[in-house]
Image: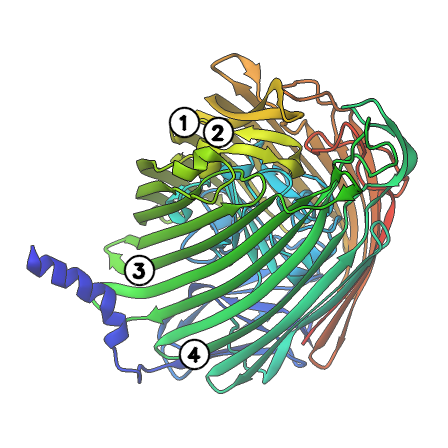
Amino acid sequence: MKGRLIKICTVFASPFLWPAALQAQTVTGTVQSAGNPVVGATVRLLELDRIEHTGAQGQFTFSDVPKGIYRVFVGVTGYASATDTVKVISDTARVSFDLRESAIHLKEVVVSASPIARTSDEQYQSTASKSRVEFQNSTGTSFAEKISDLPGVAVRSNGSAPSRPILRGLGDNEVLVLENGLRMGDLATFDPAHATPIEAISVSQIDVVRGPATILYGPSTIGGLVNVITDMVPSVSDHSISGTAAIEGNTVSNEGAAYVNNVYSQGSQALRVSAGGIRSHNIRIPSGSYTDPGTGAVFNLDRMPQTFDRSGEAGLGYAYQSGLGTFGIGGKHFETNYGIPGVPPNPDFVNVPPTTSRIAQRRNTVEFRSLFNADGSFAKQLRLNAGYNDYNHSEFPTTQDASGVSEPQANHFHKREFNGVLQLQHQPFGKLEGTLGLWANIEDLTIEGDEPLGPNSMTGGFAGYAFEEYPAADNTRLQAGLRYDYNKIQTRPYPQSTDPVFQTLNVSRLSNALTASLGAIQQFTPHLTGSLSLARSFRAPTVQELFANGLDAPSGTYTIGSAELRPETGLGADASLKGSFTNLSFEIAPYANSIRSYIYGFLRGDTIQGFPVRQFGATSARLFGLDASVVIQPAQYFALKAGADYVNAEDTRRNVPLPFIPPLRGLLRATYQDRTYMGVIETRLAARQTRLGEGDTPTAGYAVVNLGIGVRLTRQRLVHNIGLHCDNVFNRVYRDNLSVIKDFIPQPARGFRLNYQVTY
């Protein structure tokens, strides 16, 4: 036993013991189109997770590359993406690309669905990704709104800041939002009023994995994950100065936003400096009379009350690169002060008290990332990624006192979280390739204030997993994953709590689970690929779901937990058929998900302290549906896209629908895209939602039209992207089924957005 333990420790430690003078090579090349250089193309060395951008002559260089075989991916607006394989055996390996102009990208790289970045048609699950340019030109202001045009991705809106992605009908604690693959340490899943501490203008790429992702990312991924990539740790570039800067304005909320990210590279080192901020006012809605469903009071409004957003961030990062590998550290300070909409303050405080509130967040993050290359008998590559978050969150509900309106502090949350992943890619055993991993997540949560929502607690999660792949034939790959999770919640008595229950509460909950996945990819032809993924997933109930007992004023409810809740377990099946042809691409993805002990919040029908009681309970749930999209290029530079998604969700214990499930949705989009100019017109559609769950209300169908034009200009290494968009062109009054405030006020009115980005 002792000898075996020493051997295991040696395997994990050996990459750190190799000589620093490992032989390293260079991969260099050019990207052209019809003999002309393509400037600003994104070039990715997939196996090493390295990114470069082409210079004024279309050239790129990756230095300090170990010997081996690598895939190089190139993507840029106005051209079809391309992938090639390069064999690095000498000092310099060269590869060149000749891109074809196209309004269809054909393929995209997703970094979040497997241990190594891959193109979307090589993933076992249904995935999607948006680059910086695509993301910034998308409708909306929050990161969740900007991905809501993807099939299977909806958004639950509660104003400007607190918008949350919903994947295939699941959200909150069933869908995990990550930053750079690590947990964010926030409280966004506590209730619809809590925002995710990310500003859209700072995002460089966003990945969506639809369906269970427990093997690699752990609990809270029963419905999938959204990985927001912000490049907190820089990459060493062959350019001494590189980076991006962006500004944005939006008339729908009088928004002004700016962000700059500079990377200074010299030799094997890089230093990153970034800063940004956003200032937006209350969101404009079509002018009219709107009735508060709670009181029947009528208000003449042209804006959503209390939907402002004031955010700012600043960051630093350092990276070092050699033949041994790369490592780096980055830090970011983020703070925001935003409003939660409700009945606006008005003179009649006796009969119609205001329910608006505001929330202040501060988040300090430190992130460490490393990738070490090896040529040992067992270890091929070792990654160690870890993040620490110190998160503060204060809620200030607007209430009435003897002098009128005041803002006492109602709740204050302080959460410290560590999340780390140690991942080892082993050498092939015959045809078998794979990755072994260790995962840890520790959360320390303190809740104080006038109305504490829950107890102080410590939550610890630890896991080990294996993700293995086997090429059964030239066109067939099989995947199997296995993970064991240990999860413990321990509450801590807090004598100073204003709630006597939390003064003495000292209980623990232990949850252990074995999860697994099986997948297969079949390439039927060079252009047609099918996949099938089966997964058992797991999620332990949160502290709030178990022990909450207090007024949650921003969501307008008195929330009560259920201590007897058991862990959720899901069984999911996800299939897809993907086609990628010269002038056509499509994906059809049916799925089914069965969840045992599904945890949900429901309104009991009574009140405490004048607020409706929201209690957590459990049932059995079944969700099935279909995501589909097709893009056709009928003529050069022109593309037509159609997409649709539908989910049917039911409480199988009581044979009633689950509440707040998106209806049948559709997207029709026509795009003109060449190497310089872009134009788009799209219609977003939603059917009526009359299939209602507990606490839900019917929602009418709608069709909303959006327009956009853009230009891409290059000068030397500089790439300028300018876009002008009009959202909700016809100023429609429409209400989204998932909006928390849909029964009072509608979605945003017509607004114009101006985006400018420069990459250098």
Q: Which mark, residue 565?
A: 1
Q: Earlier in the sequence, mark 2 or mark 3?
A: 3
> Which SS class for mark 4?
strand
Q: Residues within 10 Å of mark 4 (few under 14, many from 20)?
A: many
Q: Report how far apart the C-alphas of labels 4 and 1 lie in the structure.
A: 48 Å
Going from N to C along the chain, the mark reached first, 4 or 3, is 4
Horizontally, residue 16 falls left or right of residue 647, namely left
- The residue at 69%/50% (across/down) is 142
Disc number at residue 321? Answer: 4
Residue 140, percent across and down? 75, 48
Query: CB under 8 Å between callouts 4 and 3?
Result: no
> First in sequence: mark 4 or mark 2?
4
How crowded is the residue under tag 2: few (<14 C-alpha within 10 Å), some, or many (20+)? many
- Which mark is on residue 424? 3
Outermost bottom residue: 267
Helix or strand or loop: what does disc 1 sit on?
A: loop
> What amino acid type should be assigned to the residue bearing mark 1?
Leu
> Disc 1 vs disc 3: which is toward the camera?
1
